[in-house]
Amino acid sequence: MASILSLAAGLSLLIWLYLTLLHGRFWHGFEHLASPPAVSSWPAVAVVVPARDEADVIARSLTSILAQDYPGRVEVFLVDDHSSDGTARAARAAAARLGQETRLTIVAARELPPGWTGKLWALSEGLARARATAPDYIWLSDADIGYDSHILRGLAAKAEGERRDLVSLMAMLSCVSAWERLLIPPFIYFFQMLYPFSWSKDPARRTAAAAGGCILVRAAALEAMGGLKAIKDALIDDCALARRIKDLTLSGSPERAGGGIWLGFDTGARSLRPYRGLGDIWRMVARSAYTQLRHQVLLLIGVLAGMIFLYGVPSLGVLLYPWHGEGAAALLGAAAWSLMAATAWPTFRLYGQAPWRALTLPLAGALYGAMTFDSARRHWLGRGGVWKGRVSGALARRRTEL
């Protein structure tokens, strides 16, 4: 038993060496929105904000959008997706306080058609109205994201300066409570591991990712991919959009308007909604984790085994040393755990956390493994993909067929 534990710890260390040195430097966190350079002619932008029962945050979000320090033309389209809490009224009041009523258009979403997810249908409804303004870019923004005044200028300068079809920011999530400090930095860390940002922007690689809360996409590229209808049932809509846009680059399509995609960070883009305990974070992950695994049981087993191997074996090799007494297992586990913490530290630092918190990654990994299994369980019970009382397009179709 002891030799098996040492072997497992040694293999875990080898994998962490690969991840640290050869996996796209995912952990560096060096993709940040730089100070925007001057642009000779600032492109016209249409902002589309889907909102379903967002009255508690929509005023702050819209105010930050309408107050952008952007030299070009900006029109804002808020899609009221059958809200029951006065979201549209709160949005109009926020625009009126700024004297910006003429720049805000409220779009009442029609009934959700079969095969569409709610968010993508709402975005499609907003896009249908936004096209009349002939924008060069579409800014897709969640209703619970707030921005510093430089963000749109930076996004547009990045897209124009690097000729990108899509640029996206990973908004800063709330990280105040004990559960948030334990789980939010690892959530971002795991996303970077799954989609190394340097690989995502590399036109020679198939890796493609975006963060749905803040995406600036070239209007011509969106049309070239077939519009949002091409991904209408995607539950993980941001990465599906990034994949389609990047496919235009990889195919060398003559219709491609720009040059690929980019995803990075800026502390000026932040979520306005805190997580109220473990349950909120759990539901966020369980909603889509099994979808990320394409609803395949073998992938689920592989991911859960991988998480145990990567995060459980090193930490248990160290913590259980008094019981197993295998010095090699403890030393190899300590080395792997050290690499794990060292690579997680830049993300914890981004969120203003103390260095020692990076050592809690195995505990976070165990919880995220449980959330992933729960995501599969919900899918098997026919309760997966539910968000704000609405079921995802693909699951809704399956329920109808049954």
Image (spheres, rainbow, N blue to C red):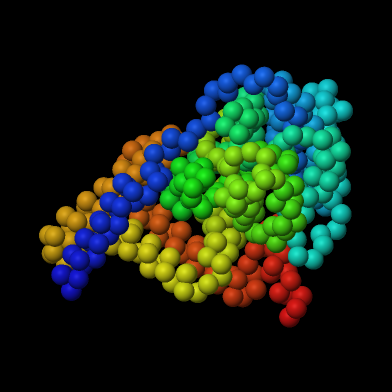
Residue lying farthest bottom? Answer: 402
Instruction: Give how far across and how far down residue 320 sits, in percent.
Output: 22, 62
On-image quarter of the C terminus:
bottom right
Left/right of residue 335 with respect to residue 221 in the rendered view: left
Residue occupying the point 70% across, 45% down: 255
Residue occupying the point 27% across, 59% down: 12
Q: Is residue 47 visible?
A: yes
- In this rendering, the answer to whether 234 lies above or below 177 is below
Instruction: Give how far across and how far down residue 38 sits, in percent.
Output: 61, 19
- In this rendering, the answer to whether 269 lies above or below 228 is above
- In this rendering, the answer to whether 341 lies above or below 393 is above
Instruction: Give how far across and how far down residue 246 sits, in percent.
Output: 59, 48
Residue occupying the point 73% across, 40% down: 219
Q: Is residue 90 visible?
A: no
Q: Nearer the viewer, residue 177 or 236?
A: 236
Left/right of residue 106 with respect to residue 248 in the rendered view: right
On-image quarter of the N terminus:
bottom left
Q: Quadrant of residue 153?
A: top right
Instruction: Give how far across and how far down residue 134 sits, in percent.
Output: 82, 35
Q: Nearer the viewer, residue 339 or 157?
A: 157
How many numbered tags mark residues here? 0
Left/right of residue 126 with respect to residue 196 in the rendered view: right
Q: Nearer the viewer, residue 347 or 277?
A: 347
Q: Quadrant of residue 138?
A: top right
Residue occupying the point 54% across, 53% down: 281
